[in-house]
Amino acid sequence: MKIKIAVLAGDGIGPEIMEQGVAVCSAVAEKFGHEVSYKEALCGAHAIDEVGDPFPEETFQICEQADAVLFASVGDPKFDNNPSAKVRPEQGLLAMRKKLGLYANIRPVETFDCLIHKSPLKDDVVRGANFICIRELTGGMYFGRKVEPTVNADGVEEALDTNYYTRPEVERILRVGYQYARARRKHLTVIDKANVLASSRLWRKVAQELEKEYPDVTTDYMYVDNAAMRMIQDPKFFDVMVTENTFGDILTDEGSVITGSMGLLPSASTGSSTPVFEPIHGSWPQGRGLNVANPLAQILSVAMLYEYFGLNREGALIREAVNASLDANVRTPEIQADSCSEKYGTKEVGKWIVDYIRKA
Ligand code: IPM
Ligand code: MN
């Protein structure tokens, strides 16, 4: 198969983990006889510095013309500490999601047996947890009407974000949830705040209608506050959860605690145009250039990319190599076993996985 990949390495640790992601992608392509080509493009703080726009038109064109986008991370502290900055790196990520119509963000949460002890949660609570969070990605408060902090007519400073959803937006993401549930343990949890929010009542109304079309799937409804609790109390309860943009953002960071490190969670964003594959973590500017960032979330994003194209053996080999590296204690510092005196960085972990794939 021929796959054209747009490579958006972005900021912070992005370029370092991307280097390993691309190396793994190429090793798999070579092994299975695929023709993969890459085109790099600017995004994030990097792009603001170079061309004044966190998601330049040229980058959009490159993404649109590609079969898939491999994305790393964006963000820079020089913008975080400046609430009046006119442009921010994160706007580049949001623009990409919106312009590529990426309404469905698929975030799997799984555990690795050898890392169970890295989770602050009890062993028997997390062992075997395996669920997918389907996060709506192009609506809600992220994209609803906003008013930046301004002084109003009464002399009081105010700001506004609107949590706006339409029925078609809700329906299409719920259907994605049902499709995933059907392919798994047939259990869908719709997470909302319908006891308070009108937008959530729309979600619940649409879900209760759709539920009838999927009688083979058990649907349950949970308020987001309760879901946040249930997720760490009894994560094995969940199979597929589906929720709005903001709730999904928060719940998936919480989900990373189950796995033990944010550096382990990949994601896929799909919709009307080119799909994007990216780690769920940020750009970790403090780790930049130190060869300490965990490349596994990026590498597992490559597995999701192959699987998206139905190349399941390719994806499985990447997962096997990742598991083998963890078992062999070839791990970045944040998940390193206490007993292991050997030190591995981003590059060494990536290289070990590439070598494993070549030898497989
Ligand atoms: C994520 C990130 C982004 C989000 C930020 C960087 C804009 O936290 O992908 O979860 O809030 O969606
Ligand atoms: Mn987030």
Image (tube, rainbow, N blue to C red):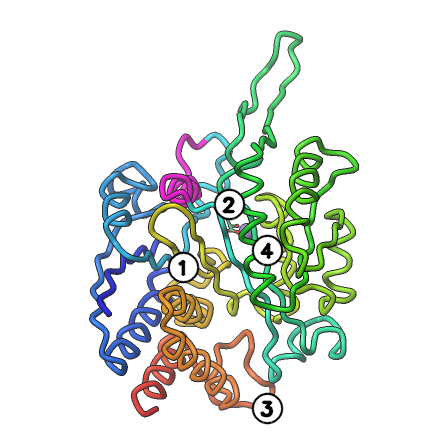
Looking at the image, do the residues carrying marks 2 and 4 touch, with CB atoms under 8 Å apart?
no
Query: Is the residue at mark 2 in contact range of ligand 1, meaning its CB lies under 8 Å from it?
Result: yes
Cα separation, mark 3 vs mark 2, equals 41 Å
Q: Which residues are magenta?
A: 85-101
Circle 2 sits on which residue? 137
User: Mark 2 or 1 closer to N-term?
Assistant: 2
At label 1, the amino acid type is Phe
Q: Main secondary structure of the magenta part?
A: helix
Give the label on residue 10, or none. Answer: none
Label 4 packing within 10 angstroms: few (<14), some (14-19), many (20+): many
Element type at mark 1 = strand
Query: Is the residue at mark 4 in contact range of ligand 1, meaning its CB lies under 8 Å from it?
Result: no
Q: Position of residue 7 (x, y in %)?
A: 29, 58
Circle 1 sits on which residue? 277
Residue 88 counted in the magenta span: yes
Relative to 349, does residue 228 appear above or below in the rendering?
above
Q: Which of 161 and 268 lies nearest the eye of the viewer? A: 268
Cα separation, mark 2 vs mark 1, equals 14 Å
Residue 330 counted in the magenta span: no
User: Mark 3 or 4 closer to N-term?
Assistant: 4
Give the label on residue 339, or none. Answer: 3
* Mark 3 or 4, closer to the camera: 4
Element type at mark 2 = loop
At label 4, the amino acid type is Tyr
Cα separation, mark 3 vs mark 1, equals 34 Å
Q: Position of residue 340 (x, y in %)?
A: 54, 90
User: Mark 3 or 1 closer to N-term?
Assistant: 1
Cα separation, mark 4 vs mark 1, equals 21 Å
Circle 4 sits on which residue? 178
* Mark 3 or 1, closer to the camera: 1
Query: Which of the 4 image quarters holds residue 288?
Result: bottom left
Element type at mark 4 = helix
